[in-house]
Amino acid sequence: MNSEMAFLRNEILQCTKCELSKTRNHAIFGEGNEDAAIMIIGEAPGRDEDIQGRPFVGKSGQLLDRILAACGFTRQEHVFISNIVKCRPPENRVPAPHEAAICMPWLLKQIELVDPRILILLGATALKYMAGQEHRITRERGNWFNWQNKLAISVYHPAALLRDPLLKRETWEDFKKVVGKYRELVNPQHYSPYV
Ligand code: URA
Ligand code: SF4
Ligand code: URA
């Protein structure tokens, strides 16, 4: 990890800027390749993440890893995974607007340091806090849009796919677009087992 990233990690792990710090076990920095071309942004750590100190390690995370594997992507090489807020909201409630606003500078700094070509926003919360509350995942998922001069796409959150498996088909179409864009922008030879 480069020193600026290591410094940022340390600041996040010790952060007490909002009340979520009082109930967390771990602040979750994120993980993956700090030079990744793809950054994945989820909502907030859940119970498993709070215990383990890593993002997306529960049921949603296992599904995310299967989707990434089908795209030929690994956490180690192709992506950096983070969240809108770094600490678990009690009872897994959606992060409140003031919590997201207080935490957002950490995420913005991560995006600046990783400097990905492609942003994948996982679910309604990531879409709304990144793009604005008026945005609707059901209408906009799978559409590329410009986020501060980066390409961004929103997709259903893996937790939504676990609740409603019928959403998987559309989500797979969305991830095929990501693989296509990755080949276009980053590596034309990128191998994926299913795309
Ligand atoms: N859901 C999220 O949005 N983020 C995680 O890190 C885990 C589950
Ligand atoms: Fe700090 Fe974000 Fe955790 Fe709040 S959620 S304590 S702002 S790291
Ligand atoms: N509803 C949500 O809250 N998230 C999704 O990703 C899809 C539907």
Image (cartoon, helix red, strand yellow):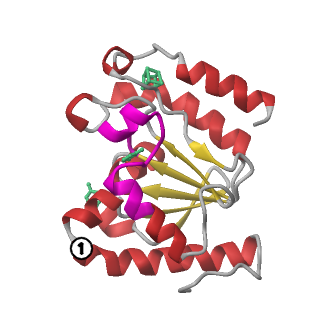
Q: Residue at x 76, y 70 (%)?
A: 186
> Residue 117: x and y, percent?
69, 59
Q: Residue furthest right?
A: 2
The number of discs equals 1
- Left or right: residue 17 versus residue 105 is left
- Left or right: residue 117 versus residue 130 is right
> Residue 191: x and y, percent?
68, 81
Looking at the rendered structure, the secondary structure element under dot 1 is helix
Q: Residue furthest bottom?
A: 194
> Residue 138: x and y, percent?
30, 66
- Compared with 78, 194 (above or below) is below
Question: Does label 1 point to a residue whose CB lies under 8 Å from ligand 3?
Answer: no
Q: Which residues are magenta?
A: 43-64
Position of the N terminus, as image quadrant, is top right
Q: Residue at x 36, y 25 (%)?
A: 98
Q: Name the quadrant containing residue 112.
A: top right
Q: Amino acid at mark 1?
A: Pro
Q: Name the quadrant containing residue 106.
A: top right
> Residue 116: x and y, percent?
69, 54
Q: Residue at x 35, y 22 (%)?
A: 24
Comparing 131 with 156, the one in front is 156
- State yes or no: residue 19 in magenta: no
What residue sits right under mark 1 in the picture?
165
- Left or right: residue 140 versus residue 28 is left
Q: Residue at x 40, y 59 (%)?
A: 62
Position of the C terminus, as image quadrant, is bottom right
- State yes or no: residue 46 in magenta: yes
Query: How many C-alpha atoms fall within 10 Å of the one at disc 1: few (<14), some, or many (≥20)?
Result: few
- Compared with 11, 157 (above or below) is below
Comparing 181 with 6, the one in front is 6
